Image (spheres, rainbow, N blue to C red):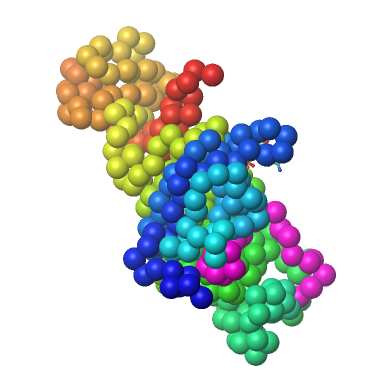
Amino acid sequence: MSPDATPHALAPALSVRDLRKTYDNGVQALKGVSLDVRPGDFFALLGPNGAGKSTLIGIVSSLVNKSAGDVEIFGVDINRQRGEAMRLVGLVPQEINFNLFEKPFDILCNYAGFYGIPREEAAARAEEELRRAHLWEKAQVMSRTLSGGMKRRLMIARAMMTRPRLLILDEPTAGVDIEIRRGMWKTLREINGAGTTIILTTHYLEEAESLCRHLAIIDKGTIIQQGSMKKLLSQLDVEGFLFDIDGDVPHALPDITGTKLERVDDHTIDLEMPRAMDLNRVFDALNAAGIRVRSMRTKSNRLEELFVRMTSREGQ
Ligand SMILES: Nc1ncnc2c1ncn2[C@@H]1O[C@H](COP(=O)(O)OP(=O)(O)OP(=O)(O)O)[C@@H](O)[C@H]1O
Ligand SMILES: [Mg+2]
């Protein structure tokens, strides 16, 4: 084993440099992507359909061959030390891809077997992972009888069998209801809290906002933004609020310089204003116009606004 075949303690969990992928049909799915994910991070990869997210994940987990560029996982090069790199990564693909006629316990043990984990060790890990996924009582039932949410948790438990240092999930909560999604968030937070670096792709932006500390936005094969979730959100220069009004909203609203005030319905006003602006100016103007605010809430998901702006800025 060469000296650098051992994962590097201080290396990024994932380092991607100028990664390119052109499929055989000529589609350029990645056009020079560079990305860093630090150890222990919870990282979101966001982007519209066809942006290149699954291609990127496929390359990192050695399912897709890259055309050019470098990828290292904890300092281990995915080409030069493929086996070692693969052992560091656990992948939860978007589609359910276990045998529905096998039992959860066997699915986990057999998976471990592929990775050369001895049967006894595999059985111990399977119990641990099934308990963590709240599936231990389902260990011996036919997987086909599991609910959709249980099936997804089983996929995560399976990926955890090899004790990956980097867990990658491709749209883990696509199409699952909010209750199941919340349950999965809890599981993922626990896994991350125990030290596993997590990267996920998602179309649910509130999921990224709630779980992830860093993110990258990819569009048409190019990273258009990356950084900390907090910093990115704070860059948003406009904030939106909804005001619930005592009595009826008048048809003519006061003009407050720099803001956009719109009537939504008889009792609701929509406000957009620069983030740096003092909200009291708005209240003063509304009071002067005889409009009393009973309550207020922040408008849409801020990340969603950011995302829409960024991916549509080319005008298409
Ligand atoms: N096996 C393939 N052969 C040819 N083209 C492909 C292949 N897989 C993906 N592509 C193309 O590469 C581009 C990126 O696809 P990719 O699946 O990586 O996007 P994505 O961001 O995961 O999208 P989604 O959000 O819809 O899952 C798309 O134009 C897609 O059609
Ligand atoms: Mg995809």
Which residue shows up at 43% across the image and 73% down it? Answer: 3
Q: Nearer the viewer, residue 218 or 48?
A: 218
Specify the quadrant of the image occupied by residue 309.
top left
Span shown in magenta: 82-104
Question: Residue 172, image x and y in percent?
Answer: 59, 54
Q: Nearer the viewer, residue 234 or 265?
A: 234
245 in the magenta segment: no
99 in the magenta segment: yes
Question: Residue 188, image x and y in percent?
Answer: 49, 63
Position of 281 compared to 141: left or right? left
Residue 35 against residue 103 in the figure, above or below: above
Answer whether residue 49 is visible to the viewer in this image. Answer: no
> Which residue is outermost to the top?
252
Position of 146 compared to 224: left or right? right
Q: Nearer the viewer, residue 218 or 84?
A: 84
> Which residue is outermost to the bottom?
120
Which residue shows up at 55% across the image and 41% down it? Answer: 20
Question: Residue 150, image x and y in percent?
Answer: 66, 65
> Which residue is outermost to the right?
101
Position of 122 compared to 85: left or right? right
Q: Nearer the viewer, residue 218 or 34?
A: 34
Figure quadrant of the C terminus? top right
Quarter of the image where ligand 2 sits: top right
Which residue shows up at 39% across the image and 18% down it? Answer: 263
Question: Residue 9, image x and y in percent?
Answer: 36, 70
Residue 186 against residue 304 in the figure, above or below: below
Residue 293 against residue 100 in the figure, above or below: above
